[in-house]
Image: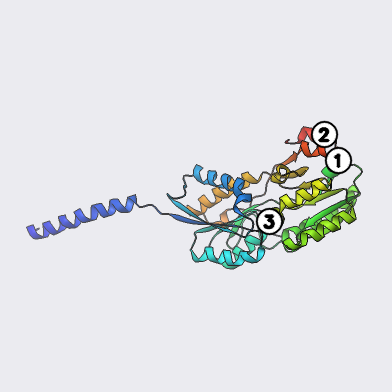
Amino acid sequence: MDRRRFLLTSLAGALAAPLAAGAQQARKVWQIGYLAAGNRSENLTYLNSFWQGLRDLGYLEGRNIAIEYRWGEGNYERLPLLAAELVKVPVDVIVTAQSTPATFAAKKATLTIPIVMVGTGDPVKTGLVSNLARPEGNVTGSSAFSVEVIPKRLELIKQLLPKATRIALLWNPENPSNTQLRELLLRAAPAVSVTLLSIEVRHPTEFDGAFTRITRLKPDALIVTGDPLHQFHIERIVDFATRSRLPTTSNIKANVEAGALMSYGPDYPELYRRAASYVGKILNGTKLGDLPVEQPMNFDLVINLKTAKALGLTIPPSLLARAIR
């Protein structure tokens, strides 16, 4: 090799070395979309669990991930536009927070970006996935739904209020999960000798009319669903129930913390930690079809003793022994 060729080769190697080092130092910043039908404040507890789950896997905002947040603020009509915005970013994966309508909006917006749903209703019955074990398409994650758990909520109300015969259900017909919940409750009601009263609220302007109807019907208890629109207005709902001295139950622990009497449902923060693990696996190349839709195995009973005292209720020892207070 002559001297000129040797110098050129050496120069090329010297230039390549810092470029290779720079390539090694450069980090891939993954884009994660977070789509919620509610707002940031009501999602904060769940977000903390999601962030911690990501940190446990070595993913840190501003370092190797960036999270694009979109909030529906209780308005389902905004969700398709917000989902489309995430697709345009573009994001590498979309997390849909505890909302069947949000998951449908994301699924409609993209057929290729992986979607990790968190705590939805029955994803097979509503059509989000065709198979839990090996989901087809681009949707996986977790469901908060259990056929056995829904009748259990009525049984718990009867244990707490043995004389209850009329129970009002505040639900949103625009939410497919709520529709299925109502059907299952209607089926289970005769077994515990109660009549289910249907109270529909599709829009914030309908709450006052719903409260008037509940007052007129005089139910013995009220069931509140986890519908994002209703959760966005949960303080308003609980305030009405408190003023009406109406025992109120839910599937979400946060509602009990807001003043509702009782909740029976899955550990939602744990579902968000699990969602973070799914996001990590997807970013590491795991095929979405190899990530089965998870269903919660454990359900917590939570009772607000302060609310029970204000209502003049004595909690049966059998419930107290099981409850988180």
Mark linked to residue 177? none
Instruction: Identify the mark nearer the N-term, 1 or 2.
Output: 1
Residue that carries the numbered disc 2 in the rendered image? 318
Distance between the alpha carbons at the discs numbered 3 and 2: 32 Å
Residue type marked 2 = Ser
Distance between the alpha carbons at the discs numbered 1 and 2: 9 Å
Q: Are marks 1 and 2 in contact (CB under 8 Å)?
A: yes
Residue type marked 1 = Gln
**Which secondary structure, mark 3?**
helix
Please name whichever residue, 61 or 118, is drawn nearer the observer in this view of the structure: 61
Q: Where, by quadrant of the figure, is residue 158 drawn?
A: top right
Q: Position of residue 284 (x, y in %)?
A: 47, 52
Of circles 3 and 2, which is in front? 3
- Image quadrant holding the C terminus, namely top right
In the image, taking residue 219 as reference, residue 44 lies left or right, namely left
Residue that carries the numbered disc 3 in the rendered image? 228
Residue that carries the numbered disc 1 in the rendered image? 159
Q: Position of residue 4 (x, y in %)?
A: 8, 60
Q: Where, by quadrant of the figure, is residue 162 drawn?
A: top right
Q: Kindly tell me whether residue 153 is visible in this rendering.
A: no
- Image quadrant holding the N terminus, namely bottom left
In the image, taking residue 136 as reference, residue 260 lies left or right, namely right
